[in-house]
Image (spheres, rainbow, N blue to C red):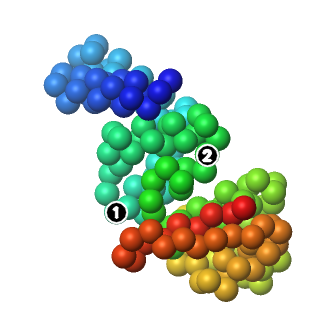
């Protein structure tokens, strides 16, 4: 489905939710369908992570961008610009999962506790450039830090 169609469907469902009583069949149907659209494609963990990183709820357009990225197999942090620390945390988690490593395994290889890595990956703890560099070395991946606009960067693994 194209982004335009996904966005139109999200907007329609959102409108049904906003304009109908909670106990109505229309509300219930729209709520369930919207939930499936989002959670089946993106997942609650990613929705929560992106919302917390941006410090606001995701817009319908951003949700459509994430769904489109997921369908194309593109890293979600390439669909939405995140603050640098969140972008680094997402990149580390994504690469760790691609390598089928546990947090404990990666933490041991980069010289930190598993609990610290868990906090970094969830966005509760800022990742240092040193830790990012060590993690990417473990993954055997070069990475780039691209300046986007004032105070924003994108971190991508090659």
Looking at the picture, tell me which residue is in the foreground, 145 or 59.
145
Residue at image mark 1: 55
Please say if 31 is above or below 29.
Answer: below
Residue at image mark 2: 74
The image quadrant that residue 4 belongs to is: top left
Q: Residue at x 53, y 67 (%)?
A: 154
Please say if 42 is above or below 156.
Answer: above
Q: Is residue 126 visible?
A: yes
Q: Position of residue 143 (x, y in %)?
A: 69, 70
The image quadrant that residue 26 belongs to is: top left
- Nearer to us of marks 1 and 2 is 2
Q: Residue at x 63, y 64 (%)?
A: 156
Q: Please count the marks in the image.
A: 2
Q: Position of residue 121 (x, y in %)?
A: 60, 66
Q: Residue at x 76, y 53 (%)?
A: 98
Please give left or right for residue 36 compared with residue 156 in the image.
Answer: left
| Image quarter (top left, top right, bottom left or bottom right) of the C terminus | bottom right
| Furthest residue in direction top, as rendered | 25
Q: Element type at marker 1?
A: loop
Please give left or right for residue 136 compared with residue 93 in the image.
Answer: right
Q: Earlier in the sequence, mark 1 or mark 2?
A: 1
Q: CA distance from mark 1 to mark 2?
A: 23 Å
Q: Residues within 10 Å of mark 2 (few under 14, many from 20)?
A: few
Q: Position of residue 142 (x, y in %)?
A: 75, 70
Q: Which mark is residue 98?
A: none
Q: Element type at marker 2?
A: loop
Please say if 151 is above or below 47.
Answer: below
Please say if 98 is above or below 134.
Answer: above
Looking at the picture, tell me which residue is in the foreground, 114 or 53.
53
Looking at the picture, tell me which residue is in the foreground, 72 or 57.
72
Q: Is residue 105 visible?
A: no
Q: Residues within 10 Å of mark 1 (few under 14, many from 20)?
A: few
């Amino acid at each position: 489905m194209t982004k335009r169609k996904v966005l139109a469907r999200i907007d329609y469902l959102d409108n049904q939710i906003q304009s109908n009583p909670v106990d109505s069949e229309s509300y219930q149907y729209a709520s369930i369908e919207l939930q499936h659209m989002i959670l089946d494609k993106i997942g609650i963990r990613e929705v929560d992570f992106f919302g917390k990183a941006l410090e606001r709820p995701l817009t319908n357009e951003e949700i459509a961008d994430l769904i489109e990225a997921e369908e194309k197999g593109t890293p979600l942090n390439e669909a939405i610009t995140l603050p640098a620390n969140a972008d680094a945390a997402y990149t580390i988690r994504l690469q760790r999962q691609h390598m089928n490593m546990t947090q404990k395994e990666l933490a041991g290889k980069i010289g930190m506790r598993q609990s610290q890595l868990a906090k970094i990956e969830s966005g509760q703890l800022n990742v240092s450039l040193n830790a990012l560099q060590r993690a990417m070395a473990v993954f055997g991946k070069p990475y780039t830090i691209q300046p986007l606009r004032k105070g924003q960067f994108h971190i991508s693994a090659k």
